[in-house]
Amino acid sequence: MSTAPLDTLLGHIRRLVDAKGVDAKSDAQLLERFIQHKDDAAFAVSVRRHGPLVLGVCRRILGQAQDAEDAFQATAKEQRRYDFGGHTLWGLALSKDGKMLAGIAGSSVQLIDTVSGKTLGPSAGHRGEVRWAILTPDRKTVLTAAGGESAIHCWDVPSGREKRPLEGAGPFSAGLELAQDSRTLYSVAYPNGSISVWDLLTRKVLRRLPVPDPKSPPALLRLSPDDSLAGSCQWPRATPARRP
């Protein structure tokens, strides 16, 4: 199987790296240089070190050589860079159409229009650090959950104002998932792990789905593609809860 695209890319990387003298840096140091100083040579070394492994994974998953090479080259190329105003980001949420990006930054959520690169302003007002953020498909609402808060916040994106929150989700939500209908929201509560099913229009809980082991803190919440199954991952095991 040909490795020409990889060899060509690695050849270019070697020339770039030799000029910068960063080859001896650790992976952590390379990542720090790229994030803090926008050092292209540091990124190039990371690609050279881990490129063969990534290409191998692409080949095993995709099967076709050309598809694998296209996927590999896409991972080794920075498509676009967005400025969140220097804030340290703890998480990201992307709208379904890819046109809006939400960055979790401490007690606020920074929104960016990915087409224009314009910052739309923060969704601020949380008492604790934001743990989860979800954008609705129409990009008009961002839903957030913060540590130490029992309410799920709802923000109107065009105006930047907070709508009436969803009360009683807590002590606080350890995960949020929006159903395909864009109206039904699932939240998992910490520490008991119960799953609440919300109607976003009425702001009411439709039902609560218990989990077998309420003493095991939840770590994750996911929905199946058809929304027929909600699963909360608890340590040390995962327990599915079927939607009635």
Image (spheres, rainbow, N blue to C red):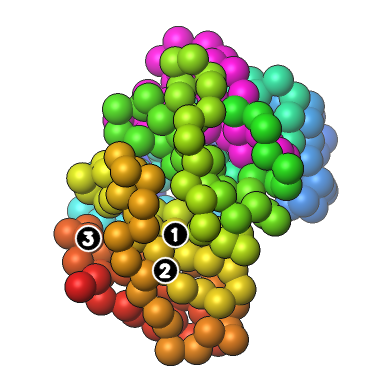
Q: CA distance from mark 2 to mark 1?
A: 6 Å
- Residue 195: give its label: 2
- Secondary structure at numbered mark 1: strand
Left or right, 145 with respect to 154, comes to right
Query: Residue at point 47% right, 65% down?
Result: 188
Give above or below for 45 relative to 215. above
Along the polypeptide, which appears first: circle 2 or circle 1? 1
**Residue 177 image position (x, y, % from top left):** 39, 54
Give the residue number, with chain letter if any, for mark 3.
227
Where residue 14 sits, quadrant-wise, is top right
Give above or below for 125 relative to 189. above
**Which of the image's four quarters has the N terminus?**
bottom left
Q: Amino acid at mark 1?
A: Ser
Residue span colored magenta: 94-122
Assess whether residue 119 is covered by the magenta stretch: yes
**Residue 13 image position (x, y, % from top left):** 60, 35
- Residue 187: give its label: 1
Tell me whether circle 3 and circle 2 mark residues in contact (CB < 8 Å): no
Where residue 221 sits, quadrant-wise, is bottom left
User: Nearest the camera: 240 or 83?
Assistant: 240
Q: Amino acid at mark 2?
A: Ile
Tell me whether circle 2 and circle 1 mark residues in contact (CB < 8 Å): yes
